């Protein structure tokens, strides 16, 4: 359950291409929300839309992994896969900002802040994937097969 062997053995371009496409989709969906941000309700809830899009794309990312590799990913592999999705989403967002908006800027005071942010992201992914694994076990208990 806590081994990277299965994930690293099957690591290929598909594990970067599929999350890259999903990251592009999240950026596009966020642009649609920002286009309609003149509406009060959308402007107030735009942050919730972004988090919802990312959460949905993480689940879709796992479904695509299952479809591409013909087997489910293990716990550590799902965390790596989610991290790849978030890194590609951040890179595409920064590239879009650099090309079309204000330019490239990252305001990180020191290395400790960056490590702290990465640790918080890793903790979030671990909790998220643990809840997904628990949900899958609950569904298996009721004999509802998903991924």
Image (cartoon, rainbow, N blue to C red):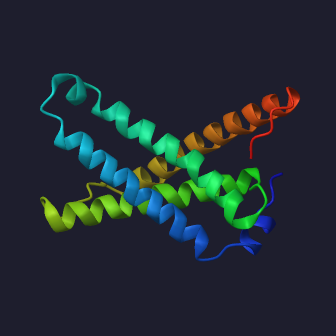
Residue 32 vs 100, above or below: the answer is above
Confirm whether residue 111 shows in the render: no
From the viewer's perspective, tell me whether residue 93 is left or right of residue 52: left
From the viewer's perspective, tell me whether residue 109 is left or right of residue 117: left
Q: Residue at x 17, y 43 (%)?
A: 35
Residue 61 vs 13, above or below: the answer is above
Where residue 80 appears, as percent x and y from the top left, is 62, 58
Q: Which residue is drawn at 47% across and 48% down?
A: 116
Confirm whether residue 95 shows in the render: yes
Along the viewing direction, whichever of 2 and 48 lies nearer the viewer? 48
Along the viewing direction, whichever of 68 and 81 lies nearer the viewer? 68
Q: Residue at x 66, y 42 (%)?
A: 129
Where residue 112 appears, as percent x and y from the top left, is 43, 53
* Quarter of the rendering containing residue 132: top right
- Residue closest to the far bottom: 13
Where residue 118 appears, as percent x and y from the top left, is 49, 52
* Quarter of the rendering containing residue 3: bottom right
- Residue closest to the far top: 41
Q: Residue at x 80, y 53 (%)?
A: 2
Where residue 44 appears, as percent x and y from the top left, is 24, 25
* Quarter of the rendering containing residue 101: bottom left
Total label count?
A: 0
């Amino acid at each position: 359950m806590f081994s990277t062997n299965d994930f690293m053995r099957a690591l290929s371009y598909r594990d970067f291409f599929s999350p890259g496409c999903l990251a592009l989709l999240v950026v596009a969906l966020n642009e649609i929300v920002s286009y309609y941000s003149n509406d009060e309700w959308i402007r107030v809830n735009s942050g919730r839309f972004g988090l919802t899009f990312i959460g949905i794309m993480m689940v879709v990312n796992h479904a695509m992994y299952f479809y591409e590799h013909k087997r489910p990913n293990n716990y550590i592999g799902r965390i790596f896969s989610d991290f790849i999705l978030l890194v590609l989403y951040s890179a595409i967002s920064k590239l879009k900002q650099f090309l079309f908006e204000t330019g490239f800027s990252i305001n990180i005071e020191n290395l400790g802040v960056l490590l702290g942010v990465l640790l918080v992201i890793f903790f979030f992914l671990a909790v998220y994937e643990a809840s997904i694994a628990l949900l899958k076990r609950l569904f298996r208990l009721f004999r509802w097969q998903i991924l």
